[in-house]
Image: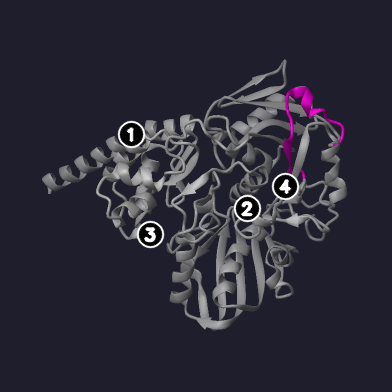
Amino acid sequence: MTNNCDTILDSWIGRESMAEAMIPLIGRLYRDNNVLTSIHGRSLINQSVISLLKAHRFARQVDDVELPVEETLPLLQVLGTLQLGAASLDLARLLSNFKASDEGDLETFLRAELADVVNRFGADERTSTDVVLYGFGRIGRLLARILIEHSGGGHGLRLRAIVVRKGGDADLTKRASLLRRDSVHGPFNGTITVDQDKNIILANGTSIQVIYSDSPATIDYTAYGIHDALVVDNTGRWRDEEGLSQHLQSRGVAKVLLTAPGKGTLKNIVHGINHGTITDHDTIVTAASCTTNAITPVLKVLNDKYGIVHGHVETVHSFTNDQNLTDNFHKGDRRGRSAALNMVLTETGAAKAVAKALPELEGKLSGNSIRVPTPNVSMAILNLTLENGTTKDEVNTYLRDMSLNSGLRKQIDFIDSPEVVSSDFVGSRRAGIVDGLATISNDKHLVLYVWYDNEFGYSCQVVRVMEEMAGVHPRAFPALDAAAPQAAALV
């Protein structure tokens, strides 16, 4: 028994050592070559040794076996010699393609597979885009964390400024403190300092100018060296074209993205579904709601395979700061009652908003919402009538495959653990996570339970839309199908 235990421990230590050797290789590819590496969509950038090993372990959900570190380390070593240009590389899929090929030499295979970016060091067709966060609340601060995390070598989306209304003499320090510490998402991964004289927050080398303003139309961003900026309005104060157009009146602004459902004819974008409708001429776009982002990808794949006749969406949603902590006047029905003490029945526009991204579901969905006393992570219950019947095992197998192998694998996740609860999904980068064990299927009647981190998961979707608007995502290798390499988001 002792010898067996020693063997297991020695094997673990050896794998740890190889994962440690991977970290500088991943880092150099990212910072020097603007190459993003992942394992089946799980990013390897800025990960710890244990996180890297967990990513290798995750591969068994796709290939039924754990991805050997003994194979990925040599792959990274070869990649580091190819003078690559900007790209997004899935190591697991590259290795799978290599094993399926007739090529016996890894370097020769990689040179052919990545021919478009080999010996393209320093070549990056993307243009850096200045980003301004208008508002610095729950979503604004999470967007800042993601943008800072993926600042890389300075290409792509560059967080340059935040705009807020000054809250007092200690405003700058308080803003930095809220970025540094979060009761739900934990501490900021890095260092933060404050330059009081210049109103700058410095986070992991990213210099964030804090601009105080009460009006979106009167700011001269060019005075801060900001040009052709993408302004992300996360205040929710303006939701129509007239209100959001105020941002375009400020010098240095090129485009605006709203982190809420838009009104009127504004495009409501759910990345993975209708982001391809964004054109260079779209100056104002909205990223819809967290719930719409969570359910639309799942509804799309279900409608594609089974057809949806009609359905009802019930969301069990964590309370938000538009509710009262204690009973008090509120202009909305029921939201004046204490969010911390009650389940609060309220409305949701998510069911109708789905049709803006998926017109084929127009008029087929109804919806309602129950706000509950949890700070984050929500659930959508999809009660659907299908055109074509299915079984629990069949639909779960299909959704699991969609979460791993489809073009929506960054939006849909799947889990079948009997022990998961809402807090287990804090920090999920997927738009929605199907709980397979909870699925109920009775031929043409299907009930699905979809978890979603209504803060962080939604913020990742927002960043994907930002990348689409700015055209800054690198090409992905290998493509999910036999077509040409496709674009890939950072998150």
On residue 20, which mark appears?
A: 1
First along the sequence among labels 3 and 1: 1
Tell me the distance, in whole angstroms, between the alpha carbons under discs 2 and 1.
33 Å
Q: Position of residue 442 (x, y in %)?
A: 52, 83
- Residue appearing at x 54%, y 56% in the figure: 422
Q: Quadrant of residue 233?
A: top right
Classed neighbour count for the residue bearing mark 1: other residues with Cα under 10 Å, few (<14), some (14–19), many (≥20):
some
Tell me the distance, in whole angstroms, between the alpha carbons under discs 3 and 1.
24 Å
On residue 280, which mark appears?
A: 4
The residue type indicated by label 3 comes to: Val
Q: Position of residue 175 (x, y in %)?
A: 69, 30
Span of residues in magenta: 217-235
**In front of the other: 5 or 96:** 96
Tell me the distance, in whole angstroms, between the alpha carbons under discs 4 and 1.
43 Å
- Residue appearing at x 66%, y 69% in the figure: 313
Q: Is residue 105 within the magenta segment?
A: no
